[in-house]
Amino acid sequence: MVYLADWYSALKNGKQLTNIEWYFDHYGPYVVDVYNAVKEDQSIVA
């Protein structure tokens, strides 16, 4: 979802919402910082 927000903002406004440098692997866009933030935030983990 973070990637999609960045992507849409780049299309509409010409710049990302975040300063993340996205890495693309076999499964799509990925960045370990976003993964770790979600993993550490107990309000997000179900």
Image (spheres, helix red, strand yellow):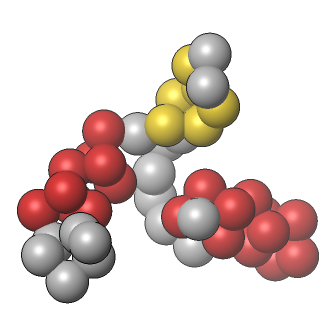
In the image, 45 versus 41, the foreground residue is 45
Residue 23: horizontal and vertical position, in percent?
52, 29
Q: Is residue 11 above or below residue 23?
A: below
Q: Residue furthest top?
A: 26
Q: Is residue 28 above or below residue 46?
A: above
Residue 9 quadrant:
bottom right
Residue 33: horizontal and vertical position, in percent?
27, 48
Tell me what residue is drawn at x 20 percent, y 83 percent.
43
Residue 31 is left or right of residue 13, and the answer is: left
Residue 20: horizontal and vertical position, in percent?
45, 51
Tell me what residue is drawn at x 24 percent, y 69 percent.
45
How many numbered marks, from 0 up?
A: 0
Tell me what residue is drawn at x 12 percent, y 75 percent.
42
Quadrant placement of the C terminus: bottom left
In the image, 17 versus 41, the foreground residue is 41
Quadrant placement of the N terminus: bottom right
In the image, 43 versus 7, the foreground residue is 43
Residue 16, visible in the rendered structure: no
In the image, 5 versus 1, the foreground residue is 1
Residue 40, visible in the rendered structure: yes
Tell me what residue is drawn at x 46 percent, y 58 percent.
19
Residue 8: horizontal and vertical position, in percent?
79, 69
Q: Residue furthest bottom?
A: 43
Q: Residue furthest front?
A: 46
Q: Is residue 42 above or below residue 29?
A: below
Q: Is residue 33 above or below residue 44?
A: above
